[in-house]
Amino acid sequence: GTIDKEYPRQGGYAFEFGETSAAARIVERMVPPTSLDVAFLAVCQKDSTEITAADRVLLSNAIRTAPNDRIVVTHGTDTLIQSAQFVQQSHAATGKRVVFTGAVQPERFRDSD
């Protein structure tokens, strides 16, 4: 989603997804540095308007099989609610705390939310 988008490498207006997730960059900047055991997994890096039912199945499976019981999902805001509802209805998050979060502006923007 938007939170992970970066300025286009080729110029123009079409934002791209970078090598490092926004979540990883945010954790790196935490002050004081976190001592949490953090893992990052990219399920599908695409605009949330392009997310399919198959993508939501992949997301649910990633949550279900994650060894962690606390999970943060960065997601585009256009279909964040639909994906969260899908995960809930699939019971993939049973016994886990899952937080979905998105942004209006990319994390790379200086004044991002």
Image: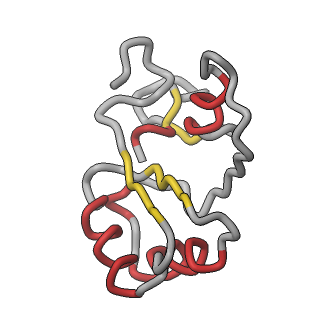
Give the image's coloring scheme.
Answer: secondary structure
Instruction: Look at 54% across and 58% down and name the residue there.
Output: 71
Residue 14 lies in quadrant: top left
How far from the left and from the top, in percent, is residue 25? 63, 29
Instruction: Look at 34% across and 29% down and name the residue there.
Output: 105
How far from the left and from the top, in percent, is residue 1? 42, 48
- What is the number of callouts on the image? 0
Q: Does residue 35 appear to the left or right of 13 in the view shown?
A: right
In this picture, is 26 found above or below 93? Answer: above
Residue 24 lies in quadrant: top right
In this picture, is 75 found above or below 58? Answer: above
How far from the left and from the top, in percent, is residue 27? 62, 31
Q: Does residue 58 appear to the left or right of 28 in the view shown?
A: left
Task: From the viewer's side, name the closer residue of 69 and 57.
Answer: 69
How far from the left and from the top, in percent, is residue 17? 57, 41
Instruction: Look at 52% across and 23% down and name the residue there.
Output: 11
Instruction: Look at 60% across and 22% down and name the residue there.
Output: 30
